[in-house]
Amino acid sequence: MSHLGRLAFILFTILRFGLDELALSGLRGRWMRRLVRVLTVGRRLDSPRGARLRQALEQLGPIFVKFGQVLSTRRDLLPVDVADELALLQDRVPPFPGADAVALVEQAFGRPLAAVFASFDTVPVASASIAQVHFATLLDGREVAVKVLRPGMLSVIETDLTLLHTLARWVEHWSADGRRLRPREVVAEFDNYLHDELDLVREAANAAQLRRNMQDLQLVMVPEMVWDLCTPGVIVMERMHGVPISQIERLRAAGVDIPRLARDGVTIFFTQVFRDGFFHADMHPGNIQVSLAPDTFGRYIALDFGIIGTLTEVDKDYLAQNFIAFFRRDYKRVAELHLESGWVPPATRVDALEAAIRAVCEPHFDRPLREISLGTVLLRLFQISRRFNVEIQPQLVLLQKTLLNVEGLGRQLDPELDLWATAKPFLERWMSEQVGWRGLWLRLKQEAPRYSQLLPALPRLAVQRLQSPAGTSDALLAALLVEQRRTNRLLQGLIWAGLGFVLGAAAVRLWPWLV
């Protein structure tokens, strides 16, 4: 019954704000208009369509607000008036009262506000779907930002997520095509990330990890957490001073190199994904600022770390190979990678998949970013995936969403930005580090502690095996042999590498006497 009640509320909200006029214009008869008028008492359509869409999403709750935030970055797919209104969802969701925020802070810390802060601004500086932020000053004079979780959020989100899980089960049961999309796994992934966002301590830990990862890049700043004042419902962090990245004219007037800023954004994204496997997965403009301070001029400022994506080494390697194959227009390799990863059935013909991928991607190369609609490309690829029974990978859903955010942001900053040309050198360098000498040396250093313990023990393990009764310790012997073969391969690689280096050096020395 709760599901039916929520479905009824969603339908009522759609009709109440006239969203049916946007989607079903010209498809209804006079009787339908009369029915809608009866069902939606007080229905008014005098507000602009963008404002009505934004208000409806706010009314429907945080999950729908998140959806609007993603849409707001895709100005190439939306009318200007709709995109402008959805952009307000990024940090201007209606706030809850400041008195409630004060009560939540005092409850979290178990002491009066004056015992923690010298000053606390009860008017929030930003209000989003999950929490809102207040500026404050600690007793020692440090300026901080205080993030407070919205009251009653858990019950609201649980209701919507339960409904989504039910809908996913229905889709899998009734639709063969829906089963291929693995909706239950996708919803489960979304469920995990939303619950992670409700634990602000987890967000603080995400920020700390991202701050360490990005420290040597010198392109992005992440606020430092005040760990003594971090709880599941309230966290306190260093206050950052910057200009929202959406205020492009203000940044340009201050002397910021906008095209370089766009390229830096691509570099930051691909560094987080392919070097660290740990990336900010909520990169809409409301969460990004730019520093104008003299010592950090032009650097990004990242905010809101509730949603973080992670990738395994296998995921990173697979994605990097796919990207590079696309950059080189090696569509056969892309098709082979789909087969190797199990994304398509083993019986799929490589040449047929290659031809289909080429037909989608080839028309979009050699164009500036402003002329490429990634939405169109994804739509065509979806049609191909249906034809070849490609399975959607739930662990990559966040990455796909973030890539859309990055593309939308780059489109706003520099319409001439070539996303692929900017990313290609980075990915080729990353692959070189993985499969070249630097990658070999790095892995040897990582494995050194393990082999330093294993190698001296090999004689003892061999004697134990010889002294044991026949038929015992077979698993131990098998593991020992595997490790020994692995060690031999590494040692042979080192020997051949050293021999190649010596021969190369000798050739360089002897060359003047040989010519």
Image: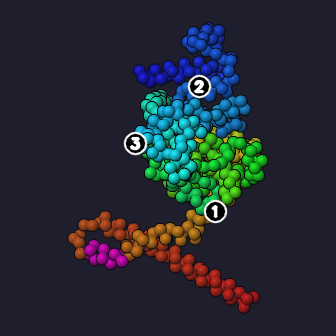
Specify the quadrant of the image occupied by residue 58.
Answer: top right
The residue to which callout 3 is attached is 110
Query: Is the stretch drawn in magenta largely helix, strand or loop?
Result: helix
Look at the numbered disc 1 and give the secondary structure of its residue. Answer: helix
Q: Quadrant of the C terminus?
A: bottom right
On screen, residue 343 above or below 36: below
Q: Amino acid at mark 2?
A: Ala
Picture coordinates of residue 342, whole percent (x, y): 51, 48
| Dot label at residue 429 | 1
Picture coordinates of residue 16, whole percent (x, y): 59, 18
Q: Earlier in the sequence, mark 1 or mark 2?
A: 2
- CA distance separating discs 3 and 2: 37 Å
Is residue 4 visible in the rendered image? The answer is: yes
Which range is magenta? 456-466
Q: How is the image coloured?
A: rainbow
Q: Is 461 one of the magenta-colored residues?
A: yes
Mark 3 or mark 2, which is nearer to you? 3
Q: Quadrant of the N terminus?
A: top left
Is residue 361 visible in the rendered image? The answer is: no
| Dot label at residue 56 | 2
Picture coordinates of residue 185, whole percent (x, y): 47, 39
